[in-house]
Image (cartoon, rainbow, N blue to C red):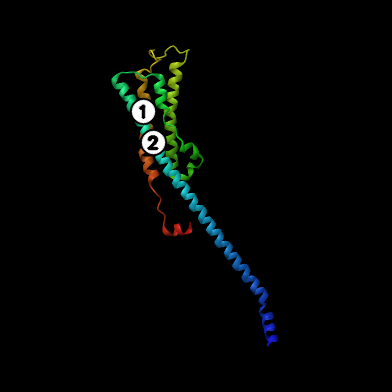
Amino acid sequence: MTGFLLALIHRWNLPQFLYNWQTLFAGSLALVAAWLTLRAARRKERQDVEAMRKSLAVEIRRLVDILRQTREGFIAAVQSARAPLVSDVVKQTSRGVPIVYPATADRVGLLGDVAPDVVGFYANLKDVEFAGRMTNAIYLAPDQGDQGDQGDQGPYVPLTDLPGLIDLIEKAHQSAPPLLSQLNSQERRPWWRRLVG
């Protein structure tokens, strides 16, 4: 009987057969492990993008509120014919300091189609801040002939310059609602995509 079993093992080449199955099993486990790792990485990336979307939306809402207040203050100044101080204009145009965007700017491309709108909003915000700093440079420069009306507290910005600032603020303000609706929409993926990762 032992001779028969030895002949059968030799004929089937049982050691090679077991070795091949062991390799196939180990390879299958490696593929499953790689798939699970890839799926976890994709899930983490989606969670990071979703967190970035929500954070940017909160920050943009805050900045839009600041822009609205600034615009209303400038409109009130024009309507009441009271020129604001240069220092007040600089303060008002530089109040909206982004925090989330500078920290996530290198990953904003992961937002997909929303990315150009996000960059555009923050560029408009930077334009408003730059216009305020230029107002400061123009009306506080000692070598400028026209320094605006000089008051007790310093030079005033002429009322004729405020509509340009108001237009810049309005441009930034108007770009926010469609952007916020895009940032708040969540991507629905088909069941088979969720299964794959």
| Mark 1 in CB contact with mark 2 (< 8 angstroms) | no
Element carrying mark 2: helix
The residue tagged 2 is 62
> Which of the labelled discs sits on residue 70, or is there none?
1
Q: Quadrant of residue 77?
A: top left
Residue under the point 37% across and 31% down: 67
Residue 16, position in %: x, y? 67, 73
Q: In which quarter of the image is residue 183?
A: top left
Q: In which quarter of the image is residue 53?
A: top left
For residue 10, above or below residue 125: below
Amino acid type of the residue that numbered disc 1 sits on in the rendered structure = Thr
Residue 95, position in %: x, y? 41, 29
Element carrying mark 1: helix
Residue under the point 45% across and 13% down: 144
Residue under the point 40% across and 37% down: 60
Residue 4, position in %: x, y? 68, 86
